Amino acid sequence: MAVAFFCLSGLFAGCKGGEAEHRPVFLLRVGQGVVTPLEFQRAFEIAKVAYPHNTLQEAAARREAQLRLLEEMIDELILLEEAHSLRVVVGREELAAAVEKIKADYPEGGFEQVLLENAIPYAEWEKAVRRRLLIEKVVEVGLIDTVELTPQDISAFLAAHGQAPAGSDPGGDAPAALEPRIDTKLIRYIRKQKAEAAYADWLKGLEAKYAVEINHDLWNEITGQAR
């Protein structure tokens, strides 16, 4: 199954409000990105499918799952705000290609059946795919492309995978004998691995950049902690 299909928090997160007086009552807001209580509840109903049967019957387990979904939505709204800041966009052709690739993972009629079973409107699903592509591009532009890759990084990677010549020093410069094997795909792969290690700190930096607003009264109602 395509991962983008079950990006449940992104299915409803990131709605853009108009003027302040026309904004919906929000549960979560980051910049112009808003999640309403109804959107959260719809996303949670779908997310529950991923949990074993009866797991969420206990109040503590249910609240933990709700908190996990809220945290995912916060991260996504922050990344969408960063997309706006970096002027990252997803073109029509790019979106269409991604949609077709996802659909190709399903047997004939299977994709439509999954949408129907989960009561997901096609337009909403397509918006979720677009948001996921935006987030991937933000990570690409804001993190992966900025990672500095040193000769030592390359040597250490090759040594760890048994490709460095005997006696080479992973902490030194990349030996000339390795140059033929250092192609652009390998460089990109090593850069992505280094970016993954830096992702948490990078995201924390973005969290400090954007104000996160949570309507705690509504959150307490949703999680059953209202007084």
Image (spheres, helix red, strand yellow):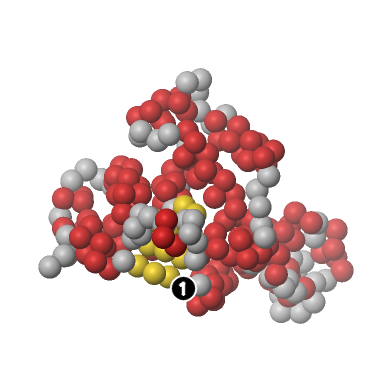
On the picture, is 26 further left or further right than 174? Answer: left
Residue indicated by mark 1: 211
What quarter of the picture does the C terminus occupy? bottom left
Q: Looking at numbered disc 1 in the image, what kind of residue is underneath it?
A: Ala
Position of residue 214 measured from the top left corner of the image (x, y, whole percent):
35, 67
Whether residue 200 is situated above or below residue 42 in the rendered picture: below
The picture quadrant where one finds residue 177 is bottom right
Position of residue 206 measured from the top left corner of the image (x, y, whole percent):
54, 72
Secondary structure of the residue carrying numbered label 1: loop
Residue that appears at 68% across and 44% down: 91
Position of residue 168 measured from the top left corner of the image (x, y, whole percent):
76, 73
On the picture, is 18 further left or further right than 40? Answer: right
Q: Which residue sits furthest front?
A: 21
Q: Which residue sits furthest top?
A: 108
The picture quadrant where one finds residue 36 is bottom left
Residue that appears at 70% across and 70% down: 146
Position of residue 109 measured from the top left corner of the image (x, y, whole percent):
47, 21
| Residue in front for this viewpoint, 220 or 193 | 220
| Residue in front for this viewpoint, 74 or 192 | 74
Classify 10 Å Cα crowding around label 1: few (below 14), some (14-19), many (20 and above).
Answer: few
